[in-house]
Image: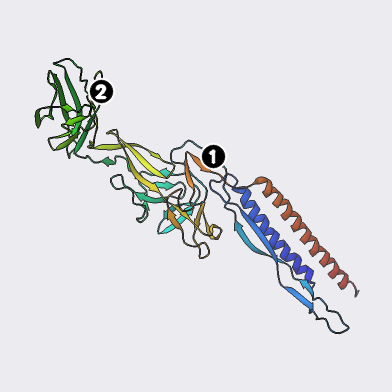
Amino acid sequence: MLRSLFSGISGLRSHQTMLDVTGNNIANVNTTGFKSSQVQFQDTLSQVLTNAGGAQDGVGGTNPAQIGLGVRVAGVTTSFTQGASQVTGRSTDMMIQGDGFFVVRKGNETYYTRAGSFDFDATGQMVLPGEGALVQGWMAVNGVIDTNGPLSDLKVPAGSVMGAVASSSATYAGNLDSAAADGTVLNRTIDLYDATGASRTLTLTFTKAATGWSLAAGDGTATVASTPVTFAANGRITSPTSLTVGGVAVDLSTLTGYAGLDTVKATAQDGQAAGTLQSFALGADGTITGSFSNGLKQVIGRIALGAFTNPAGLEKAGGSLFRTTVNSGDPAIGTAGTGGRGSLAGGALEMSNVDLSSEFTSLIVAQRGFQANSRVITTSDEVLQELVNLKR
């Protein structure tokens, strides 16, 4: 049979594959995080009719004579160029700007994806819709995240409790008016908490007399007797710079005694009441921060990203997921914005990187290539028909 017949068949098969790949790209033009693919062709083995000959005295060299035996698909590669951004406004939508993949777990297998349209299930687990894959990262312990630890399922359960912290220190700052009238009394309060979150009020009472200011303190259970408050010539406090009330150290070292200003107040204490989770927000670095009923915010967890030396070596696993192969290398797990991993943008999604103009051009090229190879088969058939008709 004619070689051209089989070359034409190989061309049909290869261009059919190109049509399949292009059709899949176009079908996923609006798929979140989809990465388009391209087909590469290469020729198959060539049959040698005449080998090359070297030059000799009086005779020149000759080139080899070969006939190709068709075409084949060398590979289908995935393009990981950045897709366009679509602003959604949803707090759970995340987009990677740059390289990297979200890490998700489905069953006992770990996958990687660029699709950041996340949701929370009934148990508070962060999941990838449609697949139910669990988003991986690091959960915080008392607001502290160890990014060197193992990955775990990210979870924001409703009703999470922020524990109470007993107050151990408090700070007062500002100015006591050295020109205040005798008999002036200033009460400055701040709420303190015990280990159960129960509150009590610490009150510092400043009293102005002819000899200067004096200070007394109490929190309802413990008291500190009145003591004189003295200032240096430059207005800085010299005594007392601190005192202890009910086990709480009160810092007074920044008080001043200038004339004409009365700004002394309680500025801080390190305790807190217990609180329950009311809402949360995703930060640009993947940090999940919860807002609690006690008015405080605390880090709950952080999303992990994975980077690959050869992302084109990843295998598509469906559902906008990828799995590792021997040629992709192992993932480098870390946080957004470090180690070559891109940054995160909240309230946005990365759309498909399919270029419709390029894909429609590929459709034309594949169609014409298919038609041309069909013509080769038709022509070869006509030649064979002529041979058969030689004997009538």
Q: Position of residue 12 (x, y in %)?
A: 72, 61
As helix, strand or loop, the secondary structure at mark 2 comes to: loop
Q: SS at mark 1?
A: strand
The structure residue drawn at horizontal position 85% and vertical position 66%, both measured from the top left corner, is 382
- Pointers 1 and 2 in contact (CB under 8 A)? no
In primary-sequence order, the first of circles 1 and 2 is 1
Residue 311, relative to residue 160: is it above or below? below
Q: Which residue is mark 2?
A: 263
Quadrant of image for the C terminus: bottom right
Which amino acid is tagged 1? Gln
Residue at mark 1 to residue at mark 2: CA–CA distance: 50 Å
Q: Amino acid at mark 2?
A: Thr
Quadrant that contains the N terminus: bottom right
How packed mark 1 is, by other alpha carbons closer than 10 Å (few <14, some 14-19, many 20 or more), is: few
Residue 20, x across and y down, in percent: 65, 55
Q: Quadrant of residue 374?
A: bottom right
Residue that lies at the very extreme toward the front in this rendered image: 233
Residue at 15 percent across and 27 percent down: it is 229
Q: Which residue is mark 1?
A: 86
Q: Nearer the viewer, residue 123 or 95?
A: 95
Left or right relative to 377: residue 236: left
